[in-house]
Image (spheres, rainbow, N blue to C red):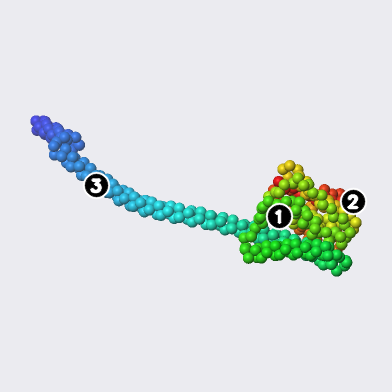
Amino acid sequence: MEANLTFVVGVSVAFFFFIGLLYVLMKKNVFGSSSPQNAESIDKSNGSNASELNEYDKQKIEDLTIENNQLRSKLAFLEVKMEKMNDKIKELNTNNKELSERAEQLNKSKEKLEELQSQKDELLSMIVHDLKNPASTIKNFIELLESYDLNAVEQQEIMSGLLETSSHILELADEVSKIMSIEKTSFKLNLSLHSINEAVDIIAKRNLPNAQKKNISLEVKKDETIPEISMDFNKIKEVIDNFVNNAIKFAPEGITVIIRTKNKGENVIVEVEDNGYGLSETDVQKAFEKGTKLSTKPTGGESSSGLGLWITKKIIEAHKGRVWVKSAKGTGSTFAFQIPI
């Protein structure tokens, strides 16, 4: 009985030992086995995962390449558009520059036309004013012929004066015709050598009837050393005529008007002096301004445009000379100009 029990126990222990050993062996085969079959299985598994990973990366790279190519195409398209825009901007800048230059040219042309129109208006004003003096002279000559018992010599002198004055009016009328026919007429001098004393003699003779009408003494004092000088003879006569005519026009009866010439080396001076009413300080300051009418009124009801002295200033300045007046209330006036010899 004990023997059988011992046998059974022995067999049981052996069984459980075998079972334990088998368990250990199985554990080793499943979790720690390094057999070729298991290694190959693991390698296959790892290779499969790597293959799947490489395919994914390849797809991503391919997608990125496609996207990059698309971006390059869009960039190239934009570069072409930018070049076209730059060309258009350059064209617009060129057109803008041309338009600006054209606008500047038009503006200069406009200014030039305005300047020419202003010159034309000024010249017409000068000529219209200058027509008044010889017209008045002719009137006075005719009044002398009607009012006085003149001898043949005196009549001949008046007729000569009428002829000279009429010729002067025709010259002025010719200038008006030129102005009306030529739009670009401008104020120019016709320079040539002449005697300033000869101009004084002509103007004195022209204004003698005006002086006699007002019982004014008209004297001429010439410097005979003055040589012939380069000047516009007709316009210088207009200046002297304006000074003398004004002296007579604004003077009371019985005074003396003196026309005087002086040789001052590099310049010749012409003065027209009277011992009439004289001018105020304001009149002296504004005497040569355009349109200025002096406070002193003409003593014989004559007209005054306010242009005469301004015209004389322009003529003398065109000769590179200057004009001035010395006067005071109650002491008379001296109007003068000088031009280079």
Which of label 1 and label 2 is nearer to you? 1
- Of the image marks 1 and 2, the number of the one nearer the N terminus: 1
Q: Residues within 10 Å of mark 1 (few under 14, many from 20)?
A: some
Q: For the point 78% across and 64% down, which residue is it?
A: 162
Up the image or down, 115 lies above or below 9; here it is below
Do the residues bearing badges 3 and 2 touch, measured as CB atoms within 8 Å?
no
Up the image or down, 211 lies above or below 328; here it is below
Q: Which residue is mark 3?
A: 55
- Of the image marks 3 and 2, the number of the one nearer the N terminus: 3
Q: Which residue is mark 2?
A: 330
Amino acid type shown at disc 3 = Glu
Amino acid type shown at disc 2 = Gly
- Front-most of residues 313 and 200: 200
Q: Residues within 10 Å of mark 2 (few under 14, many from 20)?
A: few
Q: How many marks?
A: 3
Secondary structure under tag 2 reads: loop
